[in-house]
Amino acid sequence: MTSVAGYTISEIAKIIKGEIISSFSPEMPVKHLVIDSRKLISPDSSLFFAIVAKRNDGHKYINELYNKGVRNFIISETPDNADICKNANVVMVKNTLFALQLLGAFHRKKFSIPIIGITGSNGKTIVKEWLFQLLCEDKKIVRSPKSFNSQIGVPLSVWQIEPEH
């Protein structure tokens, strides 16, 4: 997800209560949050969160992303590749998902704008799309891509909020 916020790794480390274990270029602005190595946009301004889930572990994609040019990583396990720690910004946290949520919450608090939350068992995505169509002519709208209404999707969606919203 993209934001023009441009937080630096130094700022992000403080926000998520992480420890910088490698500082390659700590003042480089981060604009994109990445959790999926297949959806990389602009590697030089991306930050990869190595999310650990039941069926997958984001840490196994660090080398791939590093080779694609990503130089900003949030991890909860020591990387296998020592070169990454020499030539990248690496922040260690206890829980990468919680760190992503902290960053999303911090970013959201910077803006005093209304939020519409849609809940229920069925139909959330279509209602979200209808509301977008109804409101987009009069308002600048941020909406979750696809069905990003999970513990991962909400912070990624909130990251898109910009000052002009």
Image: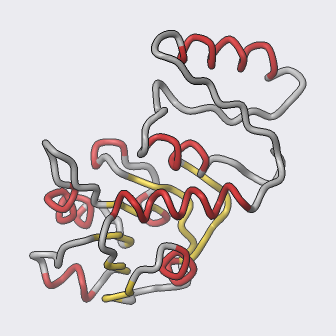
- Residue closest to the eye, 17 or 39: 17
Taking 103 as reference, is 89 left or right? Answer: left
In the image, residue 153 sits, relative to residue 16, either above or below, namely above
**Position in image of residue 19 (x %, y %):** 38, 86
Residue 20: % across, % down: 38, 87
Residue 86: quadrant of the picture: bottom left
| Residue that appears at 56% across and 42% down | 157
Where residue 138 appears, x then y in whole percent?
A: 90, 24
Q: How many marks?
A: 0
**Percent from the top left, x then y, of residue 164?**
83, 48
Classify 94 as above or below 125: below
Residue farthest toward the left in the current orientation of the protein? 80
- Give the residue at x 46% y 79%: 17
* Relative side of 30 to 115, left or right: left
Q: Is residue 128 left or right of residue 72?
A: right
Residue at image location 52% in from the left, 10% down from the top: 123
Residue sitting farthest toward the front: 120
Residue positioned 48% across, 73% down in the render: 16
Placement of 98 over or under 54, stated as above or below:
below
Q: Which quadrant, please, contains the C terminus?
A: top right
User: Quick check: 48 left or right of 134?
Assistant: left
